Amino acid sequence: MDDIVLETRGLTKRYGGVHALEDANFILRRGEHVAVVGDNGAGKSTFVRQITAVEQKSAGQVFFDGREVNFEGPLQAREAGIETVFQTLALADDLDVPSNLFLGRELFKFRLGPFSILDRKAMRERTLEALKTTAVKIPNVDNPIRNMSGGQRQCVSIARTAAFASKLVIMDEPTAALGVQETAQVENIIRGLKEREVPLILISHNLRQVFDLVDRIVVFRRGRIVASLNKDETDGNDIVSYITGVKGADAAA
């Protein structure tokens, strides 16, 4: 179907004899926001690592933007249009905010091998614009990231993802270590992505957040997808029943 932006068929990851992810069939449509939930070790982050090629899958297929893909690493996934916020932030502590936002995609005044000159002014201006668009407040963007709070660092990472979002955004527990105010800020960024019709996969343990932000909820248990439910047709108790195994369901996408 033309509206499918991401599909996995039989996606599987094994670590020796451990089946961390087994036969995951998943579909994400254009503009759709889907939550991936489950207990610790259920396979949620493993699922994302296969899509983004942080790890190589053991079996199965990934289709993105209308074609089958076999990314060799996360850089290829990003270049294809997948922006990801992982639980472990990929930030360079010694660099300032603009340098982190443009890490790996720097703007240059001109490029001539070792004599290339960065366009720091343009990167700073676009950083301020991105922070304004995402409502992320950083008092001084010229400060090294290491001097910022954990919440500010997370917001910089999320602002980077939202600023460059093109075809798909994946967020793995983006508010797990944040306070109330910073969590609200991140949730507003997610709502902004929805308004822009940027599809999102959100991994979260926060069911209140899940029901506030997404269209559909996919439940993982012991490495398998056990339910795919429209948000308006389920509730928190129902989701918990699938997470804990009280309920079981055929995998659906």
Image (spheres, rainbow, N blue to C red):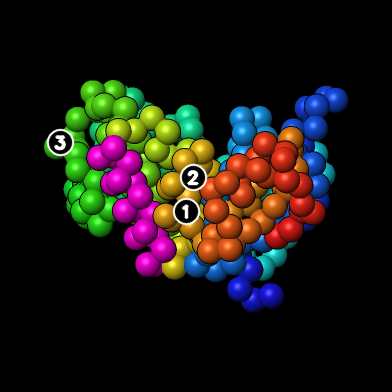
Placement of 195 over or under 114, stated as above or below: below
Question: What residue type is disc 3 on?
Answer: Asn
Please determine whether, in this image, residue 56 is positioned above or below residue 218: above
- Residue range highlighted in magenta: 180-196
Q: Residue at x 42, y 33 (%)?
A: 176
Query: Residue 147 vs residue 34: left or right?
Result: left
Where is residue 93? Give x, y as percent: 33, 25
Q: Amino acid at mark 1?
A: Phe
Q: Residues within 10 Å of mark 2 (few under 14, many from 20)?
A: some
The residue at 85%/25% (across/down) is: 17
**Which residue does the numbered mark 2 point to in the structure image?**
207
Q: Is residue 102 magenta?
A: no
Cβ–Cβ under 8 Å for marks 2 and 1: yes
Residue 71 visible in rendering:
yes
Query: Picture coordinates of residue 175 (x, y %)?
Result: 40, 38
Nearer the observer, disc 1 or disc 3?
A: 1
**Amino acid type at image mark 2:** Leu
**Residues under labels 2 and 1: Cα distance?**
6 Å
| Residue placed most toward the observer, 230 or 200 | 230
CA gap between label 3 and label 2 equals 34 Å
